[in-house]
Each structure stands twice: as structure tokens, then as C-alpha cells.
Image: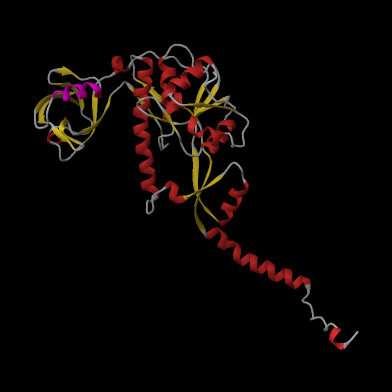
């Protein structure tokens, strides 16, 4: 072997214990930083559940039929995450990481997001009651007038109407639903005066005002209010926000007012938005809601058809039924699955 082939003397190695010591020191210094670094994501995990029927309040004087089973409301818990929490979520199939910008507009505060969710829930509850009564054929019978939710500032009616007023008569015709007002407006023009009677508290008050011009169709008249039909039914949604409980609240109202039993003693969970035409719309967090449903002992979970494919990827062993409308959901609960519904 020549000198050129002779390997140099190996460098003096550092004792292994010293390497381990320095590694431990560095990790100890960096560990707190992992808890302080917030990432632009939310972790979505299974939230609390509750029987939607318990949230429905029917005023005295109306017969109700309490179901034997349950109609479970499903929720998702959203939490901002740091580096370590994101790592845990990444390896947990029950938790998803969601880009913050997909959930909240840039610059929106926690309080603003909460208020937005609560407003969406309020609208969803109004629709749920209306759709349930339409399904039962009781919408005209139980309607008690049109409640003023808000008044457009530029509308002449802003001097006469206020939020909370209950419109019970217009042009000497009884008003029970929003549709009654629409039918009267079809024969009126912007600027025409109308006479209205409202209930403000317990007082019956006559008012008059000129009709407003519809911004989208200037030749059409409108009162210039946002309003909803008033029914003797309320829903106490507590602090839940968002519109995704619309379908299950609709089913809860139907089950309470209809003789018989939709659940047939089962624990039925469900999620999905509800529209005035009865259609059930897609929601977020479907995988986490299925985890919550299984943990709560659900026998079956009703999901929007547009969420079905994602729902089947949830790490659960529970029957999943896809529905497109409230009538579809009611038919399934009364009759069981048919060939047109997807189940797992």
C-alpha cells in the first residue's frame, strides 16, 4: 500500500453522551416554540350532539306527540392549531386540518365569525319550521302573521314599521303568511299607499305607507322589509351556529306534530342545510359529524347526497343514508331504504 493509499488518522470522536446531552438541550429549547407557533389551519373534530326534538318549543294549545327514539343534532368542533397539535391531527383519521381561509374571510375576528354563524342558524331555524309545516300541510293553518325582521332604511315603510312588528292585515285582507303579502303586491305599483295593521306587543296598530320599488325590478312593488311567517313554534338552538342543522330540526318539528313515530325507537342522526323548497344541501365537516354520530350510538345517519362520497371515507361503522330532500328523508324513516337511495 502506498502512502497515497494510506487513510489519514481518524478525527478524535466526541463522547456519545455529550452528543445526546447537546441534542436534549436543543430539543428542550425548541419545544416551547412548537406550542407558540400557530399555523393557518383549524382542526376539525367531532363536536357535541343533542336530541333536536328537545330544542323544539311548541306553544301551549297545540297537541304534540313525543317520539320514542332520538333525532341527533351533529356538530363539529373547530380549533386553531399549533405545530404539535397539527402533527397529532395529521396522524388521527378522526380529525381533519382545514385551511383557515376556507372557513373565515381574511381579517374576520372570532366574534364576527360567531355572529355570522348564529345569524345563519336563525335563518335556518325559520326555514326548518316553515318546511316542516309545509310537509305536514299545516303551514296555512298554524301561520299567525308575518313578523318584521328588518326594515330597509330607504323604504317609506321605515317610518311606520319596526323589527318585531307582526303584520296581521293589509288592505283589509288578513295576513297569515309571507305569501299573502306577495299576492297583494302583485296588483300594486311602487309609490302606492297601503294600509296595514300590525301587532306591536299586545297592541293592534294601524299604519300606512307608500310601497317601495324593487331594486332588481323597478316596476315591481315591495314593502321594503325582511320578514318571516310567524308560527307557534320556536327552536332553541343554544349557542350552535351555522345552517347545517336545518334538516334535522325540520324532522324534529315533523316528528313532534305528526301522530306516529318517525324514529320508530331508533337513534337517527342527521345533518344538512334546508331550503324553502325542501331540498337538503351539502355541509362541511361531514367526516367528523359521522364520528360524533357513532360515538352517540346512532343507528343510522342521514346525509346530503352531495356529501355521501366523502361521508363513506369516515372511519366509522354506521349506516349512512343519502337524501336530497326533506320528503326523501321522511320517506326513508317511514318506509326504509328504496332503490333510489344510497346506503352503506
Residue 148 relative to residue 310: left or right: left
Quadrant assignment, res 11? bottom right
Which residue is depicted at the point 57% across and 60% down? 34
Q: Position of residue 233 (x, y in %)?
A: 34, 22
Along the line of sight, the residue nearer the viewer: 4 or 286: 4
Residue closer to the observer: 38 or 287: 287
Q: Quadrant of the N terminus?
A: bottom right
**Image height check: is 52 above or below 24?**
above
Residue 201 seen by the camera: no
| Residue stretch rendered in magenta on the structure | 179-187
Identity of the residue drawn at 37% across and 38% down? 118
Q: Is residue 141 magenta?
A: no
Relative horizontal placement of residue 68, taking residue 237 as reference (left or right): right
Residue under the point 54% across and 17% down: 336
Residue depicted at x 89% and y 87%:
2
Q: Position of residue 274 (x, y in %)?
A: 40, 29
Q: Tell me residue 148's x, y (percent).
A: 23, 30
Q: Front-most of 61 and 183?
A: 183
Main SS, magenta residues: helix
Residue 285 visible somewhere in the drawing: yes
Amino acid at each position: 500500500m502506498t502512502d497515497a493509499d494510506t487513510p489519514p488518522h481518524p478525527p478524535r470522536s466526541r463522547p456519545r453522551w455529550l452528543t445526546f446531552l447537546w441534542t436534549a438541550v436543543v430539543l428542550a429549547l425548541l419545544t416551547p416554540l412548537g406550542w407558540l407557533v400557530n399555523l393557518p389551519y383549524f382542526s376539525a373534530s367531532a363536536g357535541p350532539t343533542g336530541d333536536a326534538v328537545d330544542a323544539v318549543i311548541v306553544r301551549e294549545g297545540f297537541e304534540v306527540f313525543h317520539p320514542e327514539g332520538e333525532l341527533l343534532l351533529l356538530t363539529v368542533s373547530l380549533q386553531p392549531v399549533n405545530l404539535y397539535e397539527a402533527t397529532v391531527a395529521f396522524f388521527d383519521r378522526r380529525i381533519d386540518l382545514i385551511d383557515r381561509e376556507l372557513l373565515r374571510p381574511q381579517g374576520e375576528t372570532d366574534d364576527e365569525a360567531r355572529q355570522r354563524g348564529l345569524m345563519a342558524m336563525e335563518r335556518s331555524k325559520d326555514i326548518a319550521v316553515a318546511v316542516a309545516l309545509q310537509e305536514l300541510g299545516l303551514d296555512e293553518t298554524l301561520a299567525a302573521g308575518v313578523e318584521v325582521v328588518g326594515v330597509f332604511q330607504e323604504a317609506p315603510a321605515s317610518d311606520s314599521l319596526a323589527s318585531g312588528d307582526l303584520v296581521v292585515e293589509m288592505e283589509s285582507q288578513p295576513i297569515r303568511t309571507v305569501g299573502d303579502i306577495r299576492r297583494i303586491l302583485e296588483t300594486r305599483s311602487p309609490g302606492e299607499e297601503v294600509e296595514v295593521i300590525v301587532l306591536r306587543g299586545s297592541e293592534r296598530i294601524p299604519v300606512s305607507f307608500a310601497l317601495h320599488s324593487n331594486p332588481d325590478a323597478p316596476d315591481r312593488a315591495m314593502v321594503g322589509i325582511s320578514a318571516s311567517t310567524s308560527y307557534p313554534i320556536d327552536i332553541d338552538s343554544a349557542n350552535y351556529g351555522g345552517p347545517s342543522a336545518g334538516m334535522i330540526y325540520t324532522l324534529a318539528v315533523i316528528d313532534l306534530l305528526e301522530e306516529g313515530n318517525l324514529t320508530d325507537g331508533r337513534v337517527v342522526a342527521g345533518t344538512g342545510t334546508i331550503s324553502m323548497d325542501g331540498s337538503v344541501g351539502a355541509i362541511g365537516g361531514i367526516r367528523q359529524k359521522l364520528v360524533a354520530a357513532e360515538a352517540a350510538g346512532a343507528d343510522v345517519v342521514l346525509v346530503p347526497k352531495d356529501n355521501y362520497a366523502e361521508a363513506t371515507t369516515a372511519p366509522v361503522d354506521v349506516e349512512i343514508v343519502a337524501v336530497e330532500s326533506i320528503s326523501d328523508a321522511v320517506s326513508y324513516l317511514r318506509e326504509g331504504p328504496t332503490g333510489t337511495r344510497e346506503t352503506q
